[in-house]
Amino acid sequence: MNRVTDNQPSRRARADWVLIAAFLVLLWMPTLDNFFNLDHSRQPGENRLPASFPKWQGAGLDGAQKYIVGLDDYFSDHFGFRKQLIRWFSELENWTFSRPQRL
């Protein structure tokens, strides 16, 4: 058989494994940042304080609902690499909208 044909499946398999590994690393990066504080970006200037971790407020469904809403607010404000993502979004927005319009 041709040498190129024999080598093709192994290259494809290697490329697939690299893609899978990169996907898994990107998927786990926010969690790793929460545990190891990997994001050293400056805190973006916001007009409010980030949400604090919620406390359980009574028994029953109403207390559970308030707790779950509080958890959602907390994790929305403390998402891994949130500071860097906000910075990239701001830079993209400035680059996109501050360029002079050409007709």
Image (cartoon, rainbow, N blue to C red):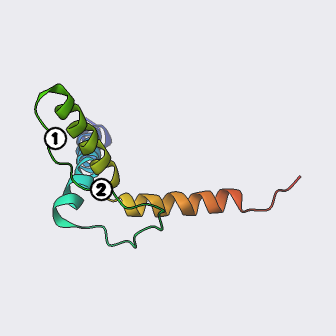
Left or right: residue 18 compared with residue 83:
left
Instruction: Please give the name of the residue rendered at 17% of the width and 26% of the height, measured from the top-left corner.
Output: 61
Residue tagged by mark 2? 78
Comes first in the chain, label 2 or label 1: 1
Q: Is residue 18 left or right of residue 97?
A: left
Q: Using the rendered image of the protein, determine whether residue 11 is visible from the camera's viewpoint.
A: no
32 is higher (above) or lower (below) than 4: below
Residue drawn at x 43%, y 60% as measured from the top left: 48
Number of marks: 2
| Residue at numbered disc 1 | 57
Q: Is residue 48 left or right of residue 75?
A: right
| Furthest residue toward top | 61
Question: Is the residue 14 above or below the residue 90 in the image?
Answer: above
Quadrant of residue 16 in the image? top left
Q: Position of residue 27 (x, y in %)?
A: 26, 47
With 36 as the anchor, is 83 left or right in this view? right
Which element carries disc 1, helix, strand or loop? loop
> Callout 2: helix, strand or loop?
loop
Question: Mark 1: few, some, or many residues within 10 Å (few <14, many ≥20)?
Answer: few
- Between label 2 and label 1, give the one nearer the viewer: 1
Residue 35: give its label.
none
Estimate the x, y position of residue 89 in percent, counting from the top left.
Answer: 51, 57
- Residue 83 spot, x, y in % from top left: 39, 63
- Callout 2 amino acid: His
Q: Residue at x 45, y 67 (%)?
A: 44
Q: Position of residue 55 (x, y in %)?
A: 16, 48
Q: Tell me which corner region of the image, top left, top right, bottom left or bottom right, holds residue 62.
A: top left
